[in-house]
Amino acid sequence: MKRNSTLILLFAGFVLVIGIVLAAILNDEQPIRYNHEKHIQDADLECVDCHRNVETGERASIPNIETCSECHDDTEDENEEIRKVATYVDEGKRIPWKQVNVVPDYAFFSHRRHVFLGKIKCETCHGNVASMVTPFSEPYREITMDWCLDCHQDRQVSSDCYACHR
């Protein structure tokens, strides 16, 4: 009898661990299954059409209802994901995107400096976004100091610590 209780407890623990892992994986999903490929190839958009600050600001900005509302306002659309966007727009609620690329507080990164002035393509850091059919749930690559320094050396630009660390 004691052996059965132990097996039941082990099995229950196993199921609990699997549940926690699955919840963590599912929790990483974005609120809308945004399809970059469809927007880039079918709608003929470019990154800057939605990420409007990419050439002018420190951050590229994650588009929200102000941008999405320019094309999506049909809450009766047959596509469930478009209906979700349109509902956020209709209700005036911000889409709760989960930020996946985070620059640490001790580092300074300017999209304008890298994209507009440095002419670095989005794909360099974010991968082949044009073929992505699901949104980012994790960074394309780990942005490390070594990776940044290698890029700076390859492009023969400043590697002065104070250029990035403030």
Image: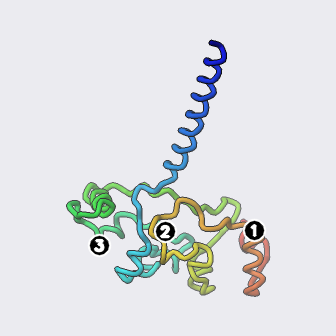
Mark 3 lies on a secondary structure that is loop
- The dot on residue 61 is 2
Q: Is residue 79 or residue 5 the one in the foreground?
A: 5
**The quadrant where residue 164 appears:** bottom right
Q: Is 96 on the left-hand or right-hand side of 82?
A: right
Quadrant where the image shows the C terminus: bottom right
Q: Nearer the viewer, mark 2 or mark 3?
A: 3
- Which residue in the structure is indicated by mark 3? 71
Residue contact between numbered discs 1 and 3, judged by CB atoms under 8 Å: no
Q: Distance between the residues labelled 1 and 3?
A: 39 Å
Please tell me which of labels 1 and 2 falls first in the chain: 2
- Identify which residue is drawn at 30% across, 64% down: 82
How many labels were placed on the picture? 3
Mark 2 lies on a secondary structure that is loop
Please tell me which of labels 2 and 3 falls first in the chain: 2
Q: Is 81 on the left-hand or right-hand side of 22?
A: left
- Identify which residue is drawn at 66% across, 60% down: 104
- The dot on residue 88 is none
Residue 146 pos. (x, y %): 78, 70
Q: Which of marks 1 and 2 is in front?
A: 1
Quadrant where the image shows the N terminus: top right
Q: Is residue 106 or residue 47 the one in the foreground?
A: 47
Residue 61 pos. (x, y %): 49, 68
Q: Residues within 10 Å of mark 2 (few under 14, many from 20)?
A: some
Q: How far apart are marks 2 and 3 (CA)?
A: 18 Å
Q: In this view, does 54 lie above or below 99?
A: below
- Which residue in the structure is indicated by mark 1? 145
Q: Is residue 165 above or below residue 43?
A: above
- Identify which residue is drawn at 34% across, 68% down: 68
Residue 16 pos. (x, y %): 56, 33
- Identify which residue is drawn at 57% across, 78% down: 123
Residue contact between numbered discs 2 and 3, judged by CB atoms under 8 Å: no
